[in-house]
Amino acid sequence: MEKRTIDAYLERYWEGETSLEEEQILRNYFREGQIAEEHKDAEALFSFFNSERDIVAQKAVSELVPQTQASSKAKIRHFNWTRIAASVMLVFTMLVGWNYFTSPTTTQSSVAVDEIQDPEEAYRVTMEALAYLSNKYDKGAKPLNAIKKVNATNIFNN
């Protein structure tokens, strides 16, 4: 067979665009034995296909896997139990959801807020709250002192 024709068929074969007739021509070409040197790499592939085609199974698959009537009944029984379990889970989920969304909402922090009538008492409570807030702010600002020391070294300035 002409080398250019085989090259074209091989190119189409690698692209997956050959017809069944063209693939048969390629198989016959590689089976004949008069193969050009450029096609030796493809010869191994086609000879592998030919050798694998001749392999015959010792037993049929249906002989290896027994089919019994009891196993199909067990599958049906199993399928029914899964339906029942899924239904129970669905109803349970719906009840939990209904309970969650219809229960009255409560806030986690319910602080009793009283109006303070005495101005001095209001001042004292406000100062306590500000002192608490200042204390928390100082605790959070302490790690930032290390950054101030790094900035003071001017290592990032060019």
Image (cartoon, rainbow, N blue to C red):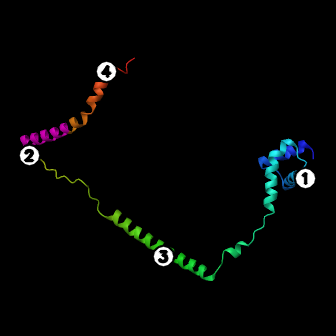
> What percent of the width, then of the height, locates residue 88?
44, 73
Spatial CA span between label 4 and label 2: 53 Å
Residue named by callout 3: 84
Residue named by callout 1: 32
Sequence-wise, the earlier of marks 3 and 4 is: 3
Sequence-wise, the earlier of marks 1 and 4 is: 1
Q: Amino acid at mark 1?
A: Glu
Contact, mark 2 vs mark 3 (Cβ under 8 Å)? no
Q: Amino acid at mark 2?
A: Gln
Numbered disc 4: secondary structure: loop
Sequence-wise, the earlier of marks 2 and 3 is: 3
Q: Amino acid at mark 3?
A: Ile
Q: Main secondary structure of the magenta part?
A: helix
Q: Nearer the viewer, mark 3 or mark 4?
A: 4
Residue named by callout 4: 153
Q: Is residue 130 above or below residue 22?
A: above
